[in-house]
Image (tube, helix red, strand yellow):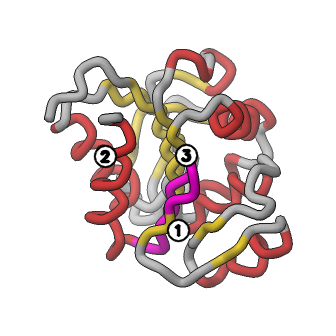
Amino acid sequence: MMLTNKKAALLVEDMYNELEVWVPYYRLKEEGVQVVVIGSGTALTYAGKYGIPITVDKSAKEVKVEDFDAVIIPGGYAPDKMRIHPEMVKLVKDAVNMGKVVASICHGGWMLASANIIRDRRVTSYIAIKDDLVNAGALWEDSELVKDGNIITSRKPDDLPAFCRSVIEALSK
């Protein structure tokens, strides 16, 4: 399936998890999706947890959610840095409210909690942030993949095959 008419925002900040950025990045591109790397605006290049850099295409201030079909939120410790930037949080919140695909893996759930959009929604995440998501009102479960409406969540890099398949399936509808 070729998704050449689809566009995804991939959010990054320092300390991102390399696997959770680069696997979806290339998997979506392989399907023809135009992937736009979005940073907070604090830098043009961000370093992953293991030092691998990524250069952004745009900052969150420079984009409109209407221009995207999906927002991908990788983990690592980057989401903790992302959520202090109102423009990044607004991008996630608006995407969910507009019914766009919003996919979060690992610590990416911090952005869902900060966007205040997971109350009474089923989600998963890395176990370390379970309490944060539950305290934000989420119905947390320990599963490889949880899809609740337009929100897709996974726990860790081992879940990337299911995560990427689910994002691609959601974009193909």
Q: Is residue 163 above or below residue 44?
A: below
Q: Closer to the N terminus: mark 2 or mark 1?
A: 1
The residue pinned by badge 3 equals 150
Q: Is residue 47 above or below residue 70?
A: below
**Mark 1: which amino acid?**
Cys
**Mark 3: which amino acid?**
Asn
Q: Position of residue 168 (x, y in %)?
A: 30, 44
Q: Look at the numbered disc 2 and give the secondary structure of its residue.
A: helix
Q: Closer to the N terminus: mark 3 or mark 1?
A: 1
Give 90 or 11, whichever is nearer the viewer. Answer: 90
Give 127 or 1, whichever is nearer the viewer. Answer: 1
Question: Residue at 64% across / 61% down in the picture?
Answer: 109
The 10 Å Cα crowd at callout 3, few under 14, some 14 to 19, many 20 or more, is: some
Question: Residue at 40% across / 65% down in the picture?
Answer: 50
Which-is-in-front pick, marks 2 and 1?
A: 2
Quadrant of the image for the C terminus? top left
The residue pinned by badge 2 equals 169
Q: Tell me how far mark 2 sits from mark 3, CA to CA.
A: 12 Å
Q: Look at the numbered disc 1 and give the secondary structure of its residue.
A: helix
Please indicate, yes or no, whether residue 77 appears anywhere in the rendered image. Answer: yes
Please indicate, yes or no, whether residue 41 appears anywhere in the rendered image. Answer: no
Task: Specify whether 173 is left or right of 153.
Answer: left
The residue pinned by badge 1 equals 106
Q: Which residues are magenta?
A: 147-156
Q: Tell me how far mark 2 sits from mark 1, CA to CA.
A: 20 Å
Q: Look at the numbered disc 3 and give the secondary structure of its residue.
A: loop
